[in-house]
C-alpha cells in the first residue's frame, strides 16, 4: 500500500526520467555495452538501479508538464548518461589504440580475434589490453565511483534540467588529443625496439644475403616484443588507472 501511495503523478515522472538517465549510462558504459550481455539483463539492471536511487530525488517536476516537455526532458537525461559514459569510453580507447599500434608493429594485424564488447574483429594485442583494463576497473571497484557520480548528479542536476556545457566540448577535444598521445606513449617502447631490430636485421641481411628473415627474423622480433610487453604492462595499467580517475573527476564539468 505504501508503494501504491508513492505512485503519484510527480513521482512517476521522476521515476521515468531517472530510468532514462540510467538507460543512457548503461547503454554506453564500457562494461555494459558488451554484446554478450543480454538486453533483458540490461533492462532489469536499469530498472533495479532506478528503484535504488529514486529516494535521492527530492524535487518534484512541474505538475503541468506537457508531453512535449517530458520528451525533451527525457532526451536531455539520455544525453547526460551518454556524455558521462562517453568520457570513459575515450579512456578505454587509449588502451585499444595503443594495443592496435603494438599489433601493427609486431606484424600481428592479421591475427584478429572476436571482440565481445564491440562484436567486431580486433587485433589480439589490443583486445588483450582492453580486457585487462576492464578487469582492473572491476577488480578495484572503480565502477563504484561512477555510481557515486550518478548519486551526485541527482543532487546537482534536477531531473530534466540538464544543460549542455561548452566546458564539455573543450574537455572532449583535449581527451581526444590525449587518446592519440597516450596511446602512442604506451606503445612507443615496443615500436622503438622493433624499429631497432629491423635496422639490425637489415644490417645482417646486407652482410649475409642468405639470411632468412622470414624464418628467423620475424619470430625473434615477435618474441622480443612480447617479452617487452610483459615488462611494460604494469606501467600501462598504472597509466590507465590515472587517466580513468582523471576522467571520473572531469565528469563534474557536467554539473556546471
Image: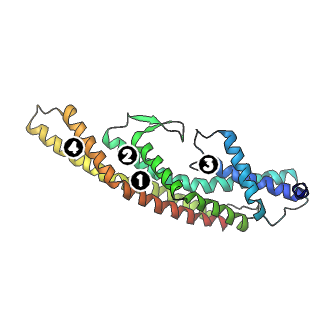
x, y percentage for residue 22? 70, 53
x, y percentage for residue 146? 61, 59
Q: Secondary structure at mark 4?
A: helix
Residue 24, above or below 152:
above
> Which residue has dot 3 on it?
28
> Which residue has dot 1 on it?
183
> Which residue has dot 4 on it?
198
Disc 3 versus disc 2: nearer the observer? 3
Residue 157, above or below 236:
below
For the point 53% across and 54% down, the residue is 138
Residue 181 visible, this orientation: no
Disc 3 versus disc 4: nearer the observer? 3
Kindly indicate whether the residue at mark 4 contacts the one at mark 3 (C-beta within 8 angstroms): no
Q: Secondary structure at mark 1?
A: helix
Q: Secondary structure at mark 2?
A: helix
- For label 2, count other residues whose C-alpha is less than 10 Å away and answer few (under 14), some (14-19) or many (20+): many
Q: Quadrant of residue 56?
A: bottom right
Q: CA distance from mark 3 to mark 4?
A: 41 Å
Q: CA distance from mark 1 to mark 3?
A: 21 Å
For the point 28% across and 46% down, the residue is 225
Q: Nearer the viewer, residue 191 or 3?
A: 3
x, y percentage for residue 67? 86, 50
Q: Nearer the viewer, residue 140 or 103?
A: 140
Residue 31 visible, this orientation: yes
- Mark 2 or 1 closer to N-term? 2
Q: CA distance from mark 3 to mark 2?
A: 25 Å
> Which residue has dot 2 on it?
101
Kindly indicate whether the residue at mark 1 contacts the one at mark 2 (C-beta within 8 angstroms): yes
Q: Secondary structure at mark 3?
A: helix
Q: CA distance from mark 1 to mark 4?
A: 22 Å
Q: CA distance from mark 2 to mark 1?
A: 8 Å
Amino acid at each position: 500500500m505504501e508503494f501504491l501511495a508513492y505512485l503519484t503523478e510527480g513521482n512517476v515522472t521522476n521515476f521515468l526520467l531517472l530510468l532514462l538517465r540510467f538507460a543512457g549510462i548503461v547503454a554506453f558504459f564500457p562494461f555494459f555495452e558488451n554484446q554478450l550481455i543480454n538486453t533483458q539483463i540490461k533492462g532489469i539492471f536499469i530498472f533495479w538501479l532506478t528503484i535504488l536511487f529514486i529516494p535521492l530525488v527530492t524535487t518534484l517536476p512541474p505538475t503541468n508538464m506537457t508531453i512535449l516537455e517530458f520528451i525533451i526532458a527525457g532526451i536531455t537525461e539520455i544525453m547526460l548518461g551518454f556524455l558521462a559514459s562517453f568520457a570513459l569510453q575515450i579512456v578505454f580507447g587509449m588502451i585499444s589504440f595503443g594495443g592496435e599500434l603494438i599489433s601493427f608493429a609486431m606484424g600481428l594485424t592479421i591475427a584478429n580475434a572476436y571482440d565481445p564488447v564491440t562484436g567486431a574483429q580486433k587485433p589480439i594485442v589490443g583486445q588483450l589490453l582492453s580486457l585487462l583494463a576492464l578487469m582492473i576497473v572491476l577488480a578495484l571497484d572503480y565502477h563504484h565511483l561512477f555510481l557515486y557520480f550518478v548519486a551526485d548528479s541527482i543532487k546537482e542536476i534536477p531531473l530534466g534540467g540538464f544543460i549542455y556545457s561548452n566546458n564539455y566540448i573543450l574537455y572532449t577535444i583535449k581527451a581526444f588529443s590525449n587518446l592519440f598521445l597516450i596511446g602512442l606513449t604506451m606503445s612507443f617502447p615496443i615500436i622503438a625496439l622493433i624499429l631497432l631490430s629491423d635496422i639490425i636485421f637489415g644490417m645482417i641481411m646486407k652482410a649475409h644475403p642468405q639470411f632468412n628473415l622470414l624464418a628467423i627474423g620475424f619470430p625473434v622480433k615477435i618474441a622480443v616484443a612480447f617479452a617487452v610487453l610483459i615488462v611494460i604492462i604494469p606501467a600501462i595499467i598504472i597509466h590507465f588507472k590515472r587517466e580513468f580517475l582523471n576522467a571520473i573527476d572531469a565528469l563534474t564539468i557536467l554539473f556546471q
